[in-house]
Image (cartoon, helix red, strand yellow):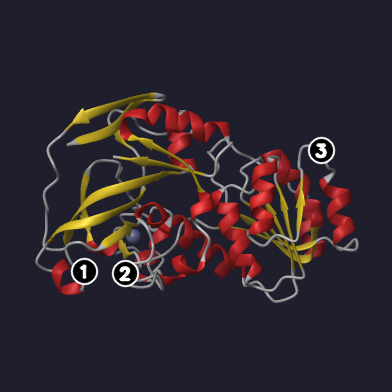
Amino acid sequence: MRCAKLYYPGQIELVEVPEPEIQSDEDVKIRVNYGALNADDYNVYIGKQGQTYCDYGLFHEISGEIVQLGAYSARTGLQVGDHVAASPFIPCGSCPACRAGKWNLCREMFSNGLLAEYVSLNHRRLFRIPQEITPQQGSLTWLVLTCVRCMERLSVLPGQRILILGAGSSGQILVQLARRKLPSILAVSEPLQSKRTLAVLNGADVVIDSTSENLMSKALDITDGAGFDIIIDAAGDILALQNSIALLERGGKLMIFASYDFTSYLNLNLADLYWKECVVMGVYGATNSPYTVSDTKILSQLSLDSLIGKVFPLSDLKQAFEAYGSRLYTRILVQP
Ligand SMILES: [Zn+2]
């Protein structure tokens, strides 16, 4: 089968490798339908993520179809033919974080690239996709679950004022989820007109053109000078983030949703955080609980098709990364 490997930043090769075998009774073999390119994949591709390359396997968000089950995994209710998505995480299972159910915070976290025609992995890493969800939509499962966890961590209350920076695929899902929290104002800042239009369709009350409008004055205008109770950074733009912190209302929360590399720093006015009792937090993927194998029904309640920006065959992987880097599209999918 064909498999994509990254031997050096920007240098992808498609290699022929044997199909993976089921290694234990807990494993499941999957024919991969789609891989969704995320910021971590891109940062590794361009050499910004302090990665050991050699034969690095690409992509961690996939959807696929079960073709073979180990003896134990067959007893979990999974069946050959089921459509599934996978968690990118391989937690150790025994560290304090894992024992507390916070697998995303595992001290010994490992992950492997899943962009191949077939993969074999532990059944605990799978999420069964609802029947009405297409394989393309299903490849957004991990992204959706991470967005759900972001909202869960923010504990949004009805009537709060929310600002989302960036209207890419994650920003669009966050808009849909935030809308359901009954905010008094749901604003989105985004440089691209097409993404601002989509954000309105997904539930934004106000969209701000971050290239031509003054975020500070417009934000204060639409919040009657109070600022926002919640600001979610889904843009990954440090300058935009820096300019938005002053817009936090007293007691406000700033959520770092976007992925940053290890050279990224932000200037924070500590007196401002202190006097306003603001909270800065992050979200790193979803956890296994409470999102069990059978609990992905939220996918059916979201508008997902508009979040699929472009689909590339595996042979055009380089073009897929270039399309991601252009920031013109929402999610980029690759079909093995
Ligand atoms: Zn662990």
- Identify the amino acid type marked 1: Leu
Residue picked out by circle 3: 212
- Residue reaching furthest to the bottom: 158
Ligand 1, image quadrant it occupies = bottom left
* N-terminal-most mark, 1 or 2: 1
Residue picked out by circle 1: 78
Residue picked out by circle 2: 293
In this picture, residue 87 sits left or right of residue 205: left
Q: Residue at x 53, y 38 (%)?
A: 262
* Mark 1–mark 3 CB contact (< 8 Å): no
What secondary structure is marked by label 3?
loop
What is the quadrant of residue 173 in the picture? Answer: bottom right
- Identify the amino acid type marked 3: Ser
- Provide residue 103's location: percent of width, then percent of height: 38, 62
* N-terminal-most mark, 3 or 2: 3
- Provide residue 314's location: percent of width, then percent of height: 32, 34
- Identify the amino acid type marked 2: Val
The yes-or-no answer for disc 2 within 8 Å of ligand 1 is no
Q: Quick one: 186 or 114, which is closer to the camera?
A: 186
